[in-house]
Every structure is written in C-alpha cells, then in structure tokens.
Amino acid sequence: MLLFLHHCSFRLITALFSAAALLQWSTAAAQLQHRLPDLHWLPATATWYGSPEGDGSDGGACGYGNLVDVKPLKARVGAVSPILFRNGEGCGACYKVKCLDHNICSRRAVTIIVTDECPGGYCSNGNTHFDLSGAAFGRMAIAGEGGQLRNRGEIPVIYRRTPCKYPGKNIAFHVNEGSTDYWLSLLVEFEDGDGDIGAMQIKEKNSGEWLDMNHLWGANWCIIGGPLKGPFSVRLTTLSTGRALSARDIIPRNWSPKATYTSRLNFFT
C-alpha cells in the first residue's frame, strides 16, 4: 500500500513539473512572438525609383525631410504600398526584402526603412509592394548584375519585419515648424526595435497627467490645447508590440520650432 502511494505521489509530482515546464515554454514562446511580429517570409513585389545608383530619397510622405538623405537612412529608405504604410502609422518600420531568381539574385536581403508611401500602380488594389532606391534594389543582385536586375523593372520578392537598429543613436524628438504653445507637433527619429508608433503622450512639468497626442500625418503627432508649458516629458508606445518608453523633460521649457532634442534612451540601450 505504501509503495502504491509513493508511486502515485511520484507520478503526480512529475506531472506537475511537466505542466509547469509546458506553461513556462508557452509563455516564453508567446512573449517572443509578441516582441517579434511577422517573422515569416511573405510574398510581395518590388520596383525601384530615382537614379540607378542613387539613394532614391526625396523627403517622403512620413515627413522625415532631409533626414532621409543622410546616414543611417540614406539608400535604405523605401516607399511601401498602403497595406504596409497604414496611414502613416507604418512609418519607421524596418523590413528585409529579398528577390527570388537565383540566376541573378543573391541570397542576401536588403534592409529597408519605411519613409514614404507609393500610391497607385503596382501599389494599388491591396497589393504588398516595395518601391526601393536604385542602390537598394541593385544590392539584391549577385555581384555585377545590379544593372540587369534593375532592367527587369517589377520583380517578385519576399519580405519580413526586422528590428530597426541605429547604432550609436538615441531616440530624438523633432519639434515641427509652426508649433506654438497651443499646437505642438513632434516627429520621432531613430527608434530602435519596432520603429513604428501606435501612441504618443506628453506630460508638462509638475503634472501627473499624461496628455494624448493625435496622429497628424505620416510620422507626425500633435496636441492642441494650452497654453502648453514646458519642459515636457514624452512617452511613446510602439504600434507592433505595444512597448513603451518615456523620456523625462526631453523638450525644454524654452523649446523652439524646427529644433531636435535627443534623449538618452532607446529600446536597445
């Protein structure tokens, strides 16, 4: 009898440990999936614009302005169809894009940062499409075949989300031109990780209340009210995974339109 009870107790303990391990594994898997969405390669099409070896940048519908003309963005910028642009909430997201014809395509994927939207044409009718710089498009080819790949025009590709990485850069907040004490508009730069923004809030000094900002257009957010008195803390929440980051008193009391204020924070630091 005692032997039977001992055997049952052992089986019960083993079952409990197995259930706990399974729960821990499931939780870890769910957290990983939550942190890194869209990990699987998906089908799309791609074209290129601008000069054949150029960075393709011309500002773009996200509102990054001259930032797209310099590193670390430069030739990595790209326009995407509305299904990925998401009315501007997809701005700043990063993707790996790879072409498929092994006769001309390398196995290397190029990394693209969303800075623009490509409406109409290949980008219409719910299609998933990337319009890349000539330089980025050519880098999908094997050595010496970049020109031949560009000559094909539209090509089938596969793509997937990838974390954005800006080594040596922290998140910066650009105060848009026209901002006043009653209308404040911000643009976020160099966001590691998800790259996109689902919500932004600001908080005035000595206030315990976070004030919601409204998505304006592209990657620009604004708040109407006031008079708004700095310094301001800014909290942003990513669209893809809902991770949040707060920069305390990042916008100073005597802030200026067209000025950029760099934090000491980023999602990978």
Image (cartoon, rainbow, N blue to C red):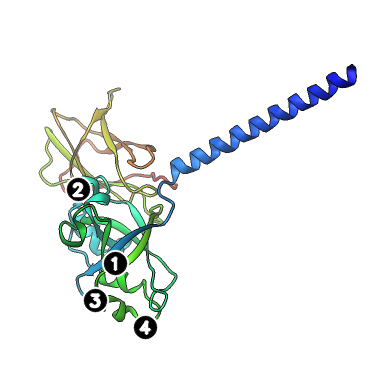
Q: Which three-letter amino acid code belongs to the residue tagged 4?
A: Gly
Q: Which residue is mark 1?
A: 75
Query: Is residue 219 something that shows in the picture?
Result: no
Judging depth in this view, the residue of 100 and 63 nearest the camera is 100
Q: Which three-letter amino acid code belongs to the residue tagged 1?
A: Ala
| Mark 1 crowdedness (10 Å alpha carbons): few <14, some 14-19, many ≥20 | many
Judging depth in this view, the residue of 58 and 155 nearest the camera is 155
| Mark 4 crowdedness (10 Å alpha carbons): few <14, some 14-19, many ≥20 | few
> Is disc 4 in contact with disc 1, using a CB cutoff of under 8 Å?
no
* Residue 122: x %, y % from top left: 20, 62
Q: Which of the two discs, 4 and 1, sits closer to the camera?
A: 4
Q: Which of the two discs, 1 and 3, sits closer to the camera?
A: 3
Judging depth in this view, the residue of 40 and 177 nearest the camera is 40
Query: Is residue 187 something that shows in the picture?
Result: yes
> Is disc 2 in contact with disc 4, using a CB cutoff of under 8 Å?
no
Earlier along the polypeptide chain: callout 2 or callout 4?
Answer: 4
Earlier along the polypeptide chain: callout 1 or callout 3?
Answer: 3
Residue 217 image-quadrant placement? top left
| Mark 3 crowdedness (10 Å alpha carbons): few <14, some 14-19, many ≥20 | some
Left or right for 38, reference 253:
right
> Is disc 2 in contact with disc 1, using a CB cutoff of under 8 Å?
no
Q: Which residue is mark 4?
A: 144
Q: Which residue is mark 3?
A: 52
